[in-house]
Structure formats: structure tokens, C-alpha cells
Amino acid sequence: MNLDLGSFAYGGIVLSGGNTPSWGTSLGQSQPDYKFTNPGADNILIGMMYCAIPLQCISLPLGKGGRIYTASDTSECQLASFFKQVYINETRIDYPFLMVLIREESTSHTGRRTIKYSDKIAYNDGINQYNNQEFIKQARVKLGLAEDACWFVYSLEIKNQDELHMYAIVVDANNSVDYPDSQTRRKKWLDLLGDDVKIFHKTSNYVFDGDEPLQQIFYGAPGTGKSHEVKKLTGEWISEVEERDLPNVFRMTFHPDTDYASFVGCYKPTMKPTSKEEKTLTGKDEEIVYEFVPQVFTDAYVYAYNNPDQPTYLVIEEINRGNCAQIFGDLFQLLDRKGGVSEYKIKADKDLAQYLREKLGADSEGIQDGKLCLPANLHILATMNTSDQSLFPMDSAFKRRWEWEYVPINYDTSIKSGEFEITIGKETDERKYSWVGFIEKVNEKIFDLTQSEDKQMGNFFIKQSIDEKGFKSKVMFYLWYEVLRDETENNKYFFYKKTIVEGKEVSSRFTFKDLYGDKATETLQQFMEYLGV
């Protein structure tokens, strides 16, 4: 289980701000439904139950903001555990370690369970007194660390039910390290961690520092990997072959029929179970009622306010395929931000305001005085195919409120798309062509024809190697329908094939219907010859 960065740390001195560790990490989020959102949290909880000890035998100074609990005052502490076998980076520490499970009662996180591991927690088994402070002293000796050493634990894991394994980074084995502020320290330490741990820390302990974009549109030709770039930013992307769903990411795709109601929400008829009395009178199990049904914007908005310690991402795919002025409506004004927060609040519709009061509370900044205000932890990310830019033009005022990042076509053969192949023909007449080699050649032709990069094909225009049938239906159809409609007017028709006539090399035109005739395979192979793939 990944720990909150800096919560179990020594010798990393923050010059502006406090140095006191929080000594705790949450297992998951309590709202709207409790979930283990910290990977490996269930593994830790199983180990803690296996090594449980009586609560009345421990004292609990819980670190930052904590108080000392007694046997008669353990309302928040629900489980205490005593681990006799403890390892740091696979080195056995000959002293036990204590952890406790806390049920939080804060306004925003009522019911959330958090693991605490303060160095002040102590346990008396009736014979001996143990405490985590002594564990740290002995750990330093085992690891060869000076008392002032800068080091931190970033992950915990349980093995064989009762072995507690800690994973730590030693920044400086002899001396403490000064950092100007906590954010600088966090960034420096993140650079020392593996990719999986970095992804976790992108979705926890949120502090707005201006580095991540509040509103950003990724744009480029179709298939350049714009959605992939978004997933890397949100933490959904793990590797070339694996992605994951995260509770703090909300996604929708715009299209010509998308409107404000399908983006924000509206009153709709829904079926509701009848009460016992109503069922007796009417004989019906359900009745039709009208209630506000939230959509993606409202769901993301509520989540962001209920989880202020982590970033929330609202992802809009194909943003220019919808009428943004109509879809955003008054929300457009919220996109002006100062310090991450909306500079100008807007009055919420009556039905939306009522819904938000129920979900956030009337005193929440998110609906105070009946007004909406985007929080700093709500990021809106979007993708846009430049080939579709004429669907619904965006006005300049809307564009100004976004950061724009161009995603170019990547012809690098060392990445995944560099392995893709086009197979044309079957059995003895089968030929294979490099996908990257093909788009390099054909994109030159597209630019020559259109004098624009918008219609070019990106390296991920296809998602894997394809056969002749797939190549014709996906790639050749795109070229014919999207690129070559006006080829005869421009006199730059490039549906050509290279053949040998009477010993001479000749280039001749072919039409789309030729791809489905008796000589379709031969025509495609000669097309590749013409392009020089």
C-alpha cells in the first residue's frame, strides 16, 4: 500500500512550513460510497486483523493533530496491531512495530478509515513496553543511517499474513536535507520513486501549485494519442498494455446532440418504490416521480468538493463535435480561475442548487449563497481532432480560457505503434508492410494534396496490426472519403499503383471500387509499391 508522501519521514526539512509528519494514510474514500482506492489497502487490513491486540493496552498519540487516547476513550480507534516480523527494504529489524486503524469523523470524510503509524504509539503487553520510537532507532542502526539522515518510507506490504514489509528511500544516509517548501520536497522525492508509486501520488494529497493545467485541450490529427496523453495526466495509464479505472476521473464524449442538460443534469421522471401504505392503496410496487438526475459535470463537481485532498478530472473527448457555447451555457464564466478557483461565481439553477445542497451541505463553498464555484482540484481536460474542427467552431473567448497542447504524429518505431504491420494478401501471395512506414509516405501525399496536417493519420490511427480487410475498411476508406473527395479538382489524385508494362515501370490510377474487385490484393500491393513503403 502506498503511503502519503512525507507521512513517515525523517531528515527532510521544510524551511517554510511545518515539518511534522501526518503519520497516516487513508485506505480509501468515504464519499459517495466507501471504496478501497489505495491499491493494496485490503492486504494491509488483513494483516492488521491477523496481528490484532487489545485496544486498552495501547496509548495513541496519533501524530499531527492527534491526541493521547486512553482505554475509556477509543471512539475513533477501531483496531490496533502488533507486528513482530518487520522488514525495511528486505532487511529484518529486530524490534516490533505498531499500527492502528482510525475511523475519521471530519466533515468531508466521515467514516473514512485511515492507517496511523506514529512513532509515539506504545504498547504494554503486561510484561514489556514497546513503542515505535524505539523501532526507528533500531532501524537506523540496521540500515546504517545517521540520526540526522534524510529518508522516508513510501509503501507498506503484508506477506504471509504477519510479516510487515516497509519500502524506503534513503535520500542522504548521513545528513538532513533542506527544502524551500513542501511542494519542492514532494517533487524531488517523487523523482526517486517508480512509475506505479508516482501514479498513486498524482491522485492523493492534492495541493494546487499551478503546475497541472486547470483547463487543457489536447489537439492534433486523428490517431496521434491525444486520449493517451490525457490518461497519463489523470493516472489511468499504467503501461502500454494496461490501464485502470479511477474514481476521480469522469468522462464523456461530445456530439452534435449534446446539450446543457446532458452535461449538467435536469429533472427527469424516474421510478421510485412505493411506501407500504401507498402499495396497500394502489396495489403498485413503484410510482413515477420527478427528480434531478445529475450528469457528468455535476458528478465531477460533487466529487471534487467531497474529496478536496485529491485532484478530480472531468475529461471531454471530441470537445469540438459539440456546440460548446450551448453545452456550457453560464458555466463558461466559471472557467476564469484565480489561484485555481473560479474568479466569478454564477447562480445555480434552482433544481441544481437543491441537489448540491443535499450532496455538499448548504454551507459548502460549492453552493454557498446558491452559487457555483469551480474548486482548484477540479481539472477539465479535453481532446480535439483537428480534422473535425469545422463541426462547431469555438469562439475566441472560449478558446482563451483553455491551455492548448499539440500532440504530433510520432514516427518512432521503438514505441508500440512501431510494431504494427499491414498484411496484404494470403498464403503464398502474402506481403507485410510497416504501419509507420506507410503513414510516413501517405502523410506526405495528404499534405501535398490538402496543404494541411489536419487530415493526416496518426501513429495510433489503428490500435494493432491489421489484415487486408481491415486496412481497406478503416484506412483506405478514410483516405477516399475524408481526404480525396476533391482530388480531381486539385489534379493531385494519389490513388495510384505502380505496374510494369512492356518492361517499363508505369503508374496508373485506380478507384475505390477496384479495392473490391478480382485484383484487389494486387492493386493494394502495387499501391504500396507506388508509395515506396
Image: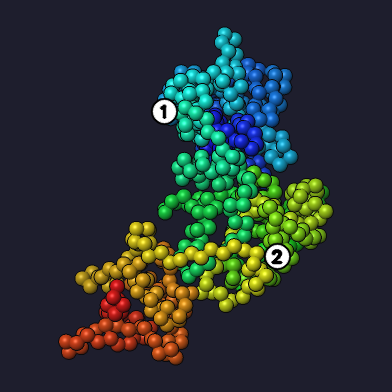
Vertically, is 126 above or below 429? above
Residue 32 appears in the picture as rendered: yes
- Mark sitting on residue 9: none
Q: Residue at x 62, y 63 (%)?
A: 402
Residue 366 position, x and y percent, is: 75, 52
- Label 2, secondary structure: give it: helix
Q: Earlier in the sequence, mark 1 or mark 2?
A: 1
Residue 119's image quarter?
A: top right
- Identity, as a three-letter code, of the amino acid under mark 1: Glu
Quadrant into which the C terminus falls? bottom left
Identified at 39% across, 74% down, the residue is 443
Side of 501 where 148 appears, left or right: right
Q: Is residue 210 above or below residue 457?
A: above
Q: Which residue is mark 1?
A: 90
Indicate whether 524 appears above or below 64: below
Name which residue lies at 60% across and 26% down.
118
Please indicate, yes or no, whether residue 314 appears anywhere in the rendered image.
no
**Mark 2 sits on what residue?**
332
- 284 with respect to 33 (left or right): right
The foreground one among 364 and 111 is: 364
The reply, left or right, for residue 31 in relation to residue 418 is right
* Residue 126 locus on image (x, y percent): 59, 10
- Few, some or many residues within 10 Å of mark 2 (<14, 14–19, 20+): some
Q: Amino acid at mark 2?
A: Phe
Q: Is residue 492 above or below residue 345?
A: below
The residue sitting at 51% across, 35% down in the picture is: 154
